[in-house]
Amino acid sequence: MGKNINEIKNEALKELESVADVNSIKELSIRYLGRKGIITQFLRNLSNLPKDERPAAGKEANHVKIFLDEQFKNAIKRLESKSIDSGLKIDVSLPGRPSVQGSMHPISEITRQICDIFTRLGFSVVEGPEVETDFYNFEALNIPKNHPARDMQDTFYISENIVLRTHTSPTQPRTMEKQDPPVRIIAPGKVYRCDSDVTHTPMFNQVEGLFVDKDVSFGDLKGILTMFIHQMFDSETSLRFRPSFFPFTEPSAEVDIRCVMCKGSGCRVCSQTGWLEILGAGMVHPAVFENIGYDTSVYTGFAFGMGVERIAMLKYEIDDTRKFFENDIRFLRQF
Ligand code: PHE
């Protein structure tokens, strides 16, 4: 059967003594312990031995295998620590590796700016669930089942009465249910609609606002929104209110700002109109107050909802909403 296991061991140790670099030790290890190595081969050949000798010989050979493996590993370790000790591997003049610094997503950044402006005006920030009941998303907001206004906000149904919210407006009844007036909140978050093109993604972000107290008027709404726009863009930016319809506000308005690109002279971004629509707003409909039990003879309020992507596109001059969600790091890194 050729050499015995102890002879092999001694030969291996002798060879180990004569090598002085990590690669040669690794080669040696493979030559003895690898899949086709001398020891591996030896173990395989044990089956040629008489049956009663096999267990003892196998045990011994396995011990040698473990022993040699340790010797090889230790030798490598010794060499490596020696080279570190003697300074061979460290070049203290090498520049450090800078850690990669992330940046805020543009949508998060704009949401934060919007919230900052409104908190300075005395609003507090609340949040609502993205998976919403039909009741809060529609019915409590005066949009009964089968009402044509539901058409504008087709969405993803989880089940017959559970939807992905189509707007942040359900935070209005949710908040009013929990507290008495005065109410002064904004509610940022994701919303969902069956929509997808250059200016629409199936998921987008809104910030809702709600202000309820005694004697709140449309003038207050105009004042707050004007103050907001002046802080968000600049104090020269003018606003215009166009009559509109939302089932949960009356009267309702859509609010445009003077095009921030062309300052009103007409360009591609504003489709030559000089104006850009940025939010929907209005006085809270009495039916909404009645639904949650506020006294409509004492309280009035206003609400508004704005699209965060729209504002971010205008602030950063971006022409395609989808860019926000493609996660191209070259795009995102710019903010
Ligand atoms: N929720 C409306 C929308 O998403 C916007 C809105 C909010 C309008 C509050 C009026 C009052 O289109």
Image (cartoon, rainbow, N blue to C red):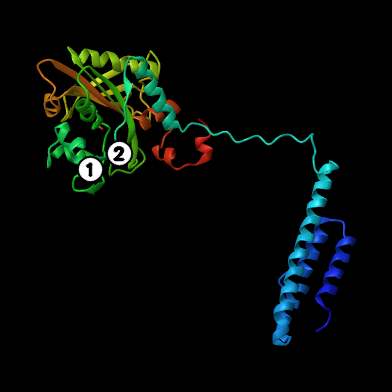
Pick the front one: 248 or 176? 176
**Quadrant containing ligand 1:** top left
Q: Which residue, given by chain and number where applicable, does mark 1 sit on?
A: 154
- Specify whether 61 is left or right of 164: right
Q: Which of the two discs, 2 and 1, labels the residue nearer the N terminus? A: 2
Query: In the displayed structure, would residue 113 be above or below residue 38?
Result: above
Query: Residue 130's mark?
Result: 2
Is disc 2 in contact with disc 1, using a CB cutoff of under 8 Å? no
Q: Which quadrant of the view contains residue 325?
A: top left
Q: Residues within 10 Å of mark 2 (few under 14, many from 20)?
A: some
Asked whether mark 1 lies closer than 8 Å to ligand 1, one says: no
Query: In the displayed structure, would residue 97 be above or below residue 65?
Result: above
Which residue sits furthest left?
297
Q: Residues within 10 Å of mark 1 (few under 14, many from 20)?
A: some
Q: Give the CA distance from mark 2 to mark 1.
A: 15 Å
Q: Position of residue 12 (x, y in %)?
A: 84, 68
SS of the residue under disc 1: loop
SS of the residue under disc 2: loop
Q: Which quadrant of the view contains residue 119?
A: top left
- Specify whether 157 is left or right of 270: left
Residue type for callout 2: Glu
Name the residue located 78 percent from the left edge and 56 percent from the top edge: 74
Q: Position of residue 58 (x, y in %)?
A: 72, 76
Can residue 317 be seen by looking at this rendering? no
Q: Which quadrant of the figure contains the N terminus?
A: bottom right
**Disc count in the image?**
2
Residue type for callout 1: Asp
